[in-house]
Image (cartoon, rainbow, N blue to C red):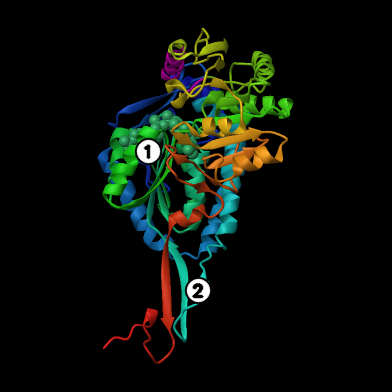
Amino acid sequence: MSQSLASLQRYDFLKELGIGEVNSGACAGPEDWADVSGKELLEVISPIDGSVIAQVGLSSEKDYDHVIEAAECSFQKWRLVPAPKRGAIIRDVASELRRLKEPLGKLVTLEMGKIVEEGYGEVQEAMDIADFAVGLSRQLYGLSMQSERPNHRMYEQWHPLGVVGIITAFNFPVAVWSWNAMVAAVCGDTMVWKPSTKTPLCAIAVQHILNRVLKSHGGGGIFTLIIGKGARIGERMINDKRIALISSTGSTAMGRRVAEATSKRLARNILELGGNNAIIVAEDANLDLATRAILFGSVGTAGQRCTTTRRIIAQRKIIDDLVNRLVNSYKQVRIGNPLDSSTVMGPLVDQEAVETMIKALANLSSQGGKIVYGGERLKGPGNYVTPAIVLVPGNTQLVCEETFAPILYVMPYDTIDDAIRLNNEVPQGLASSIFTESLKYAEKFLSAVGSDCGIANVNIGTSGAEIGGAFGGEKDTGGGREAGSDSWKQYMRRQTTTINWSDDLPLAQGIKFG
Ligand code: NAD
């Protein structure tokens, strides 16, 4: 019996989600999966124990063109469907996600390694943004303006953009796609999704859900899927003139490449890139609250969230107390199989991630860093490590890099201005927090001379954003915004319209011509 067949029997939820032993990696719409025969097969390995879960046929150039053509063709019709009717279809997507929350959440855990509670949370997030998009489908408002010309009406309206390319990272294999796709769908766009090759099965399972819903509404390639390497399929997408917007989530290096290619062809992009998030803990902070928030922010998802707490900037008077509390909390973290509901921290995504973490820690002492807890590789199958707490004098070169692993750097500060400077000193600008009971500290942190990040919180950690707000960050994080607020505007084109209902032709600025 092959290993992947054994997985199908061991994890019965895979069948419920339509995952087979060998899966097609390209889908242009309901009942339009690419043929797998003759394709290079990608082995999908679970970080839990290193076993092969299933195989996926990597997409060919021909599959790619077929998928893009399907998305282009569907756009011609989808853009004419009234937005609230598009919303009604997304409501059905939300219902189907709700029905399959448990198996899909478990698949997230099996394939990516986050604990099952977070796997369920990720599907919940997809449902939440779908619900948000349903409401949004009746609220794609444009402004009406006062014309300076008599008997003229001026207003703006929003039209669908076209085909949207969604490139996603491994660490949120369902949620990040949904932030983009649910909103873009009600805006009238069609989608091509390229997931990470580390988590293709989640994308295939979601595509099955979408296909079922779309089939019940008459089909169409509104949501399509293309699985392949970034250097090949990803590159084709970012250089493809048929794709109006590339929304990409991943490392800063990848984002730079996307920015370069899309700028060259003057296409739009949304860049959601790496973070290096800090929590400032002031001398008057509620340390119980701060410790709990830091623990979730640094150890949750085994330190593999873009919003993971990577740096603690602690006031010198309380730093020892805080570090003691953190070490005690870290000692109680149960590390193990993330499908077991008592586990708090699962494995890293792959062996390469473990190597990167170990290498970063080995380079610490040369930069004045000192490990006070953890940082070991655990023996046995799977990619398990103990999370590390490291004391550092400030933002050393290593601290400025985003090591995508559970390493928490702790550094001291003296004044609130120092703390804000340290918060802002790194190249990235995603999430930031302050724990304080002082109104002055909190307001300064949130002011124009405060945090330079896209997300700034008070007495809440850096990780665990709600979908209602616009999500994203500044500087090397890319400047993009996704999910709530008015992020939808990026998936539409704005048209400014002026109607003259007079019998004259007055010119703007009072210009007399001829
Ligand atoms: P990655 O950059 O290795 O890959 C992300 C995606 O980009 C994958 O689908 C990959 O195939 C694709 N890709 C790679 N090269 C490409 C190219 N030349 N052209 C087009 N596509 C290409 O990132 P990862 O390891 O999967 O994810 C971890 C990173 O993602 C971290 O840096 C994390 O902070 C970031 N992230 C950011 C956010 C956010 O919202 N800011 C959310 C999640 C993850």
**Residue 35 x %, y %:** 33, 38
Per the rendered image, the range of residues in magenta is 348-361
Q: Is residue 457 rendered to the left or right of residue 17?
A: right
Instruction: Give the residue at mark 1.
Output: 255
- Amino acid type, mark 2: Met
The residue depicted at 50 percent of the width and 47 percent of the height is 482
Circle 2: is it few (<14), some (14-19), or many (20+) Cα within 10 Å? few
The residue depicted at 34 percent of the width and 57 percent of the height is 73
The residue depicted at 26 percent of the width and 42 percent of the height is 62
- Amino acid type, mark 1: Gly
Instruction: Give the residue at mark 2.
Output: 145
Give the quarter of the figure containing the C terminus.
bottom left
Closer to us: 120 or 6: 120
Residue 364's place in the image compared with 476, above or below, is above
Say whether residue 374 is visible. Answer: no
Question: Residue 412's mark?
Answer: none
